[in-house]
Amino acid sequence: VGVPLLLAGPGIPHGQVCPTTVSHVDIYPTVLQATGIVATTAEHGLPGRSLFDSIGAPDLDRAAFSEYHGMGSTTASFMLRVGRYKYIHYVGYPPQLFDLETDPEELHDIAADPAAAAVLAMCRARLFGICDPAEVDARAKRRQAEQLVAHGGRAAVIARGDLGYSPPPGVAAEFR
């Protein structure tokens, strides 16, 4: 959640630092705008916005969102970055909250600190405005179970080995 992003080119102010939180999903609309390609109707609903929209107009309230549903994980995890705070929600487990301004290494979870209660509640409400973590976790687990059956069961999948990467669309998976 702290991946630096550099943007350079015509119309980009040199040496400017923009504090807007951005995400990898912002790259696609940025490339479309930079190349002059018009998004298709289906692409208009995709998440993300062009990074050009943040130049000169910082949005300190913008959130970045991610989720993780690794096969074998006990629970899904959801992350929301809002300004200086990073909120992590685990289905069925206590959340975590970090103040990245005072704790960039994320060594001190402040979720249980009464002084952080308002921030914790705000982050939780914003996450639940994006999705219902329990419903998404249950849906992911159902899909994982379907995939296990489709590929011969747990033992067959484990014996097959790991991909080690996500193959691009149209490329056959090569297991190791």
Image (cartoon, grey):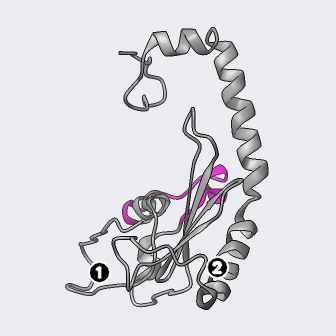
Q: Residue at x 76, y 42 (%)?
A: 138
Which residue range is magenta in the image? 34-48
Give the main secondary structure of the magenta stretch: loop
Does residue 119 appear left or right of residue 33 in this picture? right
Q: Amino acid at mark 1?
A: Gly
Question: How much space separates mark 1 and mark 2, taking CA atoms?
Answer: 38 Å
The C terminus lies in quadrant: top left
SS assignment at label 1: loop
Classify residue 112 by image quadrant: bottom right
Furthest residue toward left: 15
Q: Residue at x 34, y 65 (%)?
A: 3
Whether residue 44 is in magenta: the answer is yes
Q: Position of residue 70 (x, y in %)?
A: 54, 38
SS assignment at label 2: helix
Q: Residue at x 28, y 71 (%)?
A: 7
Indicate whether 118 appears above or below 151.
below
Q: Position of residue 150 (x, y in %)?
A: 67, 14
Classify residue 48 by image quadrant: bottom right
Q: Position of residue 163 (x, y in %)?
A: 41, 23
Q: Residue at x 46, y 64 (%)?
A: 23
| Residue annotated with mark 1 | 11
| Residue annotated with mark 2 | 120
Mark nearer the N terminus (1 vs 2): 1
Whether residue 38 is in magenta: the answer is yes
Packing grade of label 2 (10 A; few <14, some 14-19, many >=20) is many
Q: How many marks?
A: 2
Indicate whether 118 appears above or below 48.
below
The N terminus lies in quadrant: bottom left
